[in-house]
Image (spheres, grey):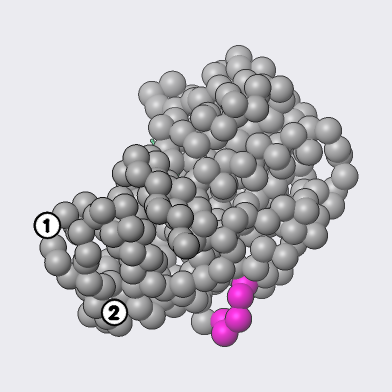
Amino acid sequence: MRIVVTGKEGQVDTAAQALGESLGLEIIRVGRPEIDLSKPETLSGPMKAARPDVIISSAAYTAVDKAESEAALAQAINGEGPGELAKIAAELNIPLLHLSTDYVFSGDKDGVYSEGDAPGPVSVYGMTKLSGETQIAAATPNHVILRTAWVYSPYGNNFVKTMLRLGETRDELNVVADQRGCPTYALEIARALLLIAQKLVADPDPALRGIFHLTGQGETTWAGFAEAIFEGSALRGGKAVRVNPIPTEAYPTPAKRPANSRLSGEKLAEVYNLRLDPWRVSLDDCLTRLTGVAAPVKE
Ligand SMILES: NC(=O)C1=CN([C@@H]2O[C@H](COP(=O)(O)OP(=O)(O)OC[C@H]3O[C@@H](n4cnc5c(N)ncnc54)[C@H](O)[C@@H]3O)[C@@H](O)[C@H]2O)C=CC1
């Protein structure tokens, strides 16, 4: 099976390539300059030449704060670009898997968000990703949109790597403690994407298509996540770093973030019989890969 993945060298793309190879799948990674989502005319030629059985769309404008001042570019990359990919998938008569975000929600809900809950993005990034979802749905029914959140991995830029880097020179860090979400490991996203891709190619059932939420099991705050990172690092001989919980107001950013972006994984479990690992289990794997040291087994 040939799978084209956009977002060459992004976190999810890198994880998909590593896992795909181990599963014997042919992963074709595409990215700039050959294909540029802000230039729709660059997409069709290389995508069709790759003769894929399925397209995984993981490339995006992911700089959440910068998007506030680059709205047109973010919209082109996160909105029109994926819409164009969906048209190409429709022409090729193949499924499109697309990654979207918890930031399509406002964060005002008390409980976890289900796929049927109304979106209401509070940032440019969230709005542009929601536009991508809408444009894909309009272009082809043969799609799966996977909303994920708080993505981290041994690759690229992410919260885990930032915390470890800052912890090298600081004894304590202030971290926001009033935003709740689900940390999600890119290697787990890749596992889910490749499993779903194989099912979609084999089975035209409409129940397998549509929007699904895909996050690590459990929930925490950014401060809770940071504490777990430093606990895991200390178990591997890293320095102890104290995490001071602070409110969002004390850490102003250009883009507003939802206070609650917890996503329910029930639909994915029911339809695909698939649950991602609990986030602490995945974090442990990530820290082992990053440090080269496994945590000692508890007595
Ligand atoms: N990182 C996170 O915390 C979250 C990510 N997501 C979504 O998951 C997906 C994957 O995220 P990551 O792997 O973390 O992203 P990443 O930021 O690691 O990689 C994004 C990739 O997109 C590529 N890209 C950017 N602009 C492009 C353009 N104009 N044309 C072609 N390629 C372009 C970049 O070069 C990079 O390879 C994205 O769709 C993102 O919106 C959803 C929720 C949270």
Residue at the far top in the pictured view: 49
In the picture, measured across the screen, residue 51 lies left or right of residue 152, that is: right
Q: Are marks 1 and 2 in contact (CB under 8 Å)?
A: no
Label 1 residue SS: helix
Q: How many marks?
A: 2
- Of mark 1 and mark 2, the one earlier in the sequence is 1
Q: Which residue is mark 1?
A: 169
User: Does the segment drawn in magenta span residue 123?
Assistant: no
In the picture, measured across the screen, residue 15 lies left or right of residue 235, that is: right
Q: Quadrant of residue 54?
A: top right
Q: Nearer the viewer, mark 1 or mark 2?
A: 1
Label 2 residue SS: strand
- Name the residue rendered at 62%, 41% in the picture: 191
- Name the residue rendered at 57%, 32% in the picture: 19
Q: Which residue is mark 2?
A: 245
Near-viewer residue (51 or 156):
156
Q: Disc 1 marks which amino acid?
A: Thr
User: Does the segment drawn in magenta span residue 110?
Assistant: yes
- The magenta stretch spans which residues? 109-113
Residue 67 x, y percent position in the rendering: 34, 55
Residue 277 x, y percent position in the rendering: 59, 56
* Dominant SS in magenta: loop
Q: On the rendered image, what quadrant is the N terminus found in?
A: top right
Disc 1 residue crowd, few under 14, some 14–19, many 20+, Cα 10 Å: few
Disc 2 residue crowd, few under 14, some 14–19, many 20+, Cα 10 Å: some
Residue 215 sits above or below residue 50 on the image: below
